[in-house]
Amino acid sequence: MIKKRHIGLLFYLFLLFLPIYWMLNMSLRTNADIMANFSLIPTSITFENYLKIFTDATWYSGYINSIIYVTINTAISLGTALPAAYAFSRYTFIGDKHVFFWLLTNRMAPAAVFLLPFFQLYSTFNLIDTHIAVALSHCLFNVPLAVWILEGFMSGVPREIDETAFIDGYSFPRFFIRVFIPLIRAGIGVTAFFCFMFSWVELLLARTLTTTAAKPIAATMTRTVSATGLDWGLLAAAGILTIVPGALVIYFVRNHLAKGFALGRV
Amino acid sequence: MNKWQDNKAWFLVLPVFIIVAFSAVIPLMTVVNYSVQDIFGPGQRIFVGTEWFKDVLQDPRLHDALIRQLTFSCLVLLIEMPLGVIIALTMPKKGWTASATLVLIALPLLIPWNVIGTIWLIFARPDIGLLGAAINGLGYSFDYTATPMNAWGTVLLMEVWHWTPLVALLAYAGLRSIPEAYYQAAKIDGASSWAIFKYIQLPKMRGVLTIALLLRFMDSFLIYAEPFVLTGGGPGNSTTFLSVYLVKLAVGQFDLGPAAAFSLVYFLIVLLFCWLFYNALQAADSGDK
């Protein structure tokens, strides 16, 4: 029984990794080799493609840009969402339910709808092609998401803790930073993970709001493809490298992840 | 939980309110503004009222895209939901294999969406791709760049590959929240594994499955980058989904008015589903307690 189940799971994992393996295979071969020979495993391994990405500024700056705006976005989302989530989990106030629903609708808004207005808005503020523009535009879906997840975690903390702290003479900011934030550390980790994830995988807004100086790696890939014909090996190597940061992040939060999903607020 | 009644809590919400207003309300108002005007260039615009809305609602290409989109989203749900649950049931419950499986299964979720497209672009090519070559090797002529049905199948397969892990992870989280005592009681009663699934696991997973169902519906409804990279909406219009068509209209042809009207209609459809989602969620929450 147990063995049969595991064979099924292993088979699924095999299928899951087949496309990724194929890209890895391509990334270790030269373009001429890819076009000429069809083979399941790379026969003559070359790191030429990776070397090109690490030495050519137009390529590696894309990774740096992506990481910069993803980090800014995660910081903004967490910074603004923490107090708001606390308000939603602890207080009732005029319009609270409506505001909460309104926030959620933004998580569901099609990015394509906001494309042109965003471009105009950020042009007005001279923010086009800056990291901050992309980071701010990603707040559209990440801030509501962060409020939503954090509210779930905060509601799990009994209110008596707040009351006791206030009786002990803690001021609100001091209580929040010293007592409350350490209590929901796991929740903050999960939230940061999801903010990172959704900002990292988004392409449409990031591509529209940047031209050169803040261009994300994902956009570099689509543009280079059309410019040079198709260098499959190089494209595959760039793709493989975009998987690495995600894999690292997921490894660090693996133990909190199940808990975050358990709250079902993704 | 009883909450404190205090309108000063608004100050805590204010930063979020400002930032979301800046990134959502102002752009949305701009879209509303476009949707009722005909724009020739900077400073040259005339008010046209609801004309764009009439145009858009009668546009046969939009109808096609909408039908294509709904079919796609329904198929995605029909395949991903049962598959995700089955995978969650087979995942190990504890030990290092559990966290290893979790990490491996979650990996596709963290790949940038256009890279997903790129992976499948390479994987499904009939000349250099493993999948394409394998299908052709079996004697079936497969080329997703030329045959609409093949393109459709490939986009669907890609979507299933990409997002089934999310359903699996949610279902897994739901399963983990079932106390061990339930299983022990079932064992004493001599319940079959099908009975355990039907009477214990499935009801307990209802909450997370509702969320998974609606999340998957929403996100597949907004799909853009993956089909854009893989097929560019073609061949013909066979994989032109709503977002792909909208971007074509707005950025490709720069038809601001119709694109804006289209955006608003699109947004209203999404909002409707969002409302249903929210209510279903509230119902599921109160059902658990």
Image: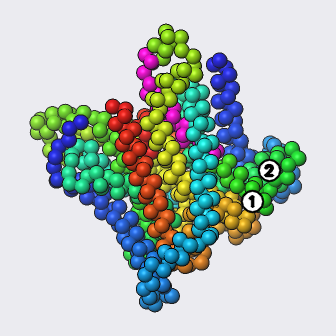
Tell me the residue at 70%/45% (across/down): A19
Residue B127: % across, % down: 83, 55
Dot in front, 1 or 2: 1
Answer left or right for B141 relative to B116.
Answer: right
Magenta span: chief secondary structure? helix
Residue B24: quadrant of the picture = bottom left
Q: Residues within 10 Å of mark 1 (few under 14, many from 20)?
A: some
Q: Amino acid at mark 1?
A: Pro
Residue bearing mark 2: B132
As shown in the figure, which amino acid type bears the numbered disc 2?
Gly
Q: Which residues are magenta?
A: B160-182
Q: Is residue B168 magenta?
A: yes
- Residue most extreme to the top: B188
Q: Is residue B19 left or right of residue B56?
A: left
> What percent of the width, then of the height, locates residue B264?
46, 68
Q: Residue furthest bottom?
A: B44
Viewport quadrant of the N terminus of chain A: top right
